[in-house]
Amino acid sequence: MPFLNEEKHQIGCCAFNSRLLYAFGGAKKKRFVDTVERYDTFHNEGWQMIQPTAVEGWSERTNLGCAQIDQQSILVFGGVVNDLEGWKKDFSFSLLYNVKLNVFESTPSDMIHPEREFFNCGPPRLQDSKFYAIDSEEQVNIFDSLTKTWSFALGKEEED
């Protein structure tokens, strides 16, 4: 497999339709990047830099999560941003990347737990149009791809 066009680490990477690989964001030397790269495993022509149309909210970030949630979208969420105050965890960040239209779309992100970390968590799962991501506190966060909303499963402390 060829190298990415831009040398970076701590990217969000996921497969799409068992054919394409997408790499979102990452860190390059001492700065974060907002680039998106795509690799087509059928044609093996190397990684391509793509320029999605962005909505407010997409910015340089690293350690983010991403996963395909339906036949046209990838959910991109969480991560760390570098603002004027330095590195900041962005727990409530959530956008949909529409692969067919090559555009980021807004999602209601107020349901993501504001104090949980999504980076360094287990791989997300998709089942019955719902995407399940376990955060650093072992809370199950659920994204419904039909309603495009977040919710939570009851954790151990909420059940008691």
Image (spheres, grey):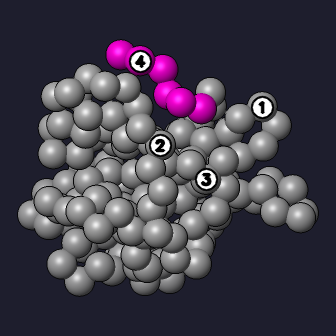
Instruction: Identify residue for label 1.
Output: 29
Viewer-side residue, 96 vs 45: 45
In the figure, residue 20 lies in which quadrant?
top left
For the residues labelled 3 and 4, the Cα–Cα distance comes to: 20 Å
For the residues labelled 2 and 3, the Cα–Cα distance comes to: 11 Å
Q: Earlier in the sequence, mark 3 or mark 4?
A: 4
Q: Position of residue 10 (x, y in %)?
A: 59, 36
- Report the residue at 54% width, 59% height from top: 78
Instruction: Identify residue for label 4.
Output: 2
The residue sitting at the left extreme is: 128
Viewer-side residue, 97 vs 102: 102
Instruction: Identify residue for label 2.
Output: 49
Instruction: Identify residue for label 3.
Output: 34
Magenta segment? 1-6
Discs 4, 1 touching: Cβ within 8 Å: no
**Identity of the amino acid at label 1?**
Lys
Picture quarter with the C terminus: bottom left
